[in-house]
């Protein structure tokens, strides 16, 4: 029995090695966001990503500039691709490997072919133990529904922006602030990162950032909502988004989703929010 189980495990490990596939994404010179063609390729790959598991991400650079700079740039490229995968709810291996190799590899003759990230992935396989005899069996989970918070709120920001029209308002889900403060809670930091990623991937996109609060019947008290919208605005500016693409404003409690005074905490949470208005695409 032990030999049989060992042979099955060896077969599984060998099959896993052969099942690996890879996606190549390319970058423009000195950029850490995938180029327009690779954005298209990634979106096509994403349509068929259900049931896939990311094993390894490797970032590369051309040989221009110093070795230390290229090493740092390749790490940024790999990390941004990782953020893009996380943003789109792609399954990551618990033993995910991430590398920035810089220029330290066999460079191709065409420099643009060296500015890339390689994503290694495989179809997820689960090992189940049969209750009758204890033998191991394999079950391919590809094509099955993955139970990851299947709610309307789970639609990615990039999907909302892609389907939005000029003039549409998009709520930044789960962007929460400390009480009576413009500082976001730690758990909400990825939301800002997602918004930054969307703006970098859509260079023509222009937005206004609208802040709202709850529980305040004074229509003239917009200070807190203004500070919250400006916090998001300042974050984007610090991370390279041009001011010409952004605007911000605080509305206080003048545009509630639920009428004041709110009846419960759920209504208060819905009213205190940050939205973006799509101004140009």
Image (cartoon, grey):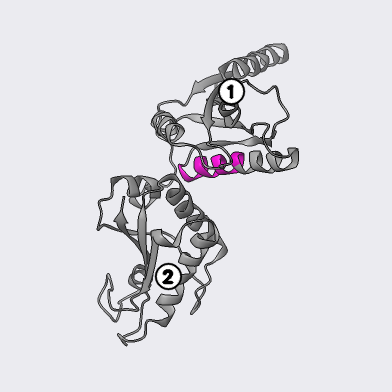
* Nearer-the-camera pick, 251 or 113: 113
The residues colored magenta run 77-88
Q: Is residue 185 above or below residue 160?
A: below
Residue 229's disc number? 2
Residue 180's disc number? none
* Nearer-the-camera pick, 103 or 109: 109
79 in the magenta segment: yes
Locate residue 130: give its quadrant.
top right
Residue drawn at (68%, 37%) of the image: 100
* Nearer-the-camera pick, 263 or 38: 38
Residue under label 1: 110
**In the rendering, at what x and y percent does residue 211 appear?**
38, 71
Quadrant location of the N terminus in the rendered image: top right
Marks 1 and 2, how far apart at CA? 44 Å
Locate residue 220: give its quadrant.
bottom left
| Residue count near mark 2 (Cα–Cα under 10 Å), binned few <14, some 14–19, many ≥20 | many
Residue drawn at (53%, 35%) of the image: 27
- Tell me the element at label 2: helix
Instruction: Please identify the dominant SS of the magenta region.
Output: helix
User: In the image, is 48 to the left or to the right of 58?
Assistant: left
**In the rendering, at what x and y percent does residue 125 appear?**
54, 25
């Amino acid at each position: 029995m032990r030999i049989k189980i060992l042979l099955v495990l060896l077969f599984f490990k060998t099959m896993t090695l052969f099942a690996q596939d890879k996606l190549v994404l390319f970058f423009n010179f000195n950029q850490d966001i995938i180029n327009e063609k690779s954005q298209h390729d990634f979106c096509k790959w994403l349509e068929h990503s259900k049931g896939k598991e990311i094993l390894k991400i490797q970032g590369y650079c051309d040989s221009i500039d110093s070795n230390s700079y290229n090493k740092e740039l390749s790490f940024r490229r790999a990390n941004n691709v990782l953020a893009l995968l996380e943003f789109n709810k792609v399954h990551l291996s618990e033993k995910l490997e991430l590398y920035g190799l810089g220029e330290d590899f066999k460079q191709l003759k065409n420099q643009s072919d060296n500015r890339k990230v390689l994503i290694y992935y495989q179809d997820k396989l689960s090992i189940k133990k049969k209750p009758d005899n204890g033998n191991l069996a394999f079950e391919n989970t590809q094509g099955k529904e993955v139970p990851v918070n299947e709610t309307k709120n789970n639609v990615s920001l990039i999907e909302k922006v892609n389907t939005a029209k000029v003039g549409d308002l998009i709520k930044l889900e789960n962007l929460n602030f400390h009480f009576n403060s413009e500082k976001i809670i730690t758990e909400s930091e990825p939301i800002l990162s997602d918004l930054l990623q969307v703006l970098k991937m859509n260079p023509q996109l222009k937005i206004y950032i609208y802040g709202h609060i709850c529980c305040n019947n004074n229509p003239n008290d917009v200070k807190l909502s203004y500070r919250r919208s400006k916090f998001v605005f300042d974050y984007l500016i610090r991370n390279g988004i041009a001011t010409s693409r952004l605007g911000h404003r605080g509305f206080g409690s003048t545009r509630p989703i639920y009428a004041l005074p709110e009846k419960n905490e759920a209504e208060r949470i819905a009213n205190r929010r940050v939205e973006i208005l799509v101004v140009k695409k």
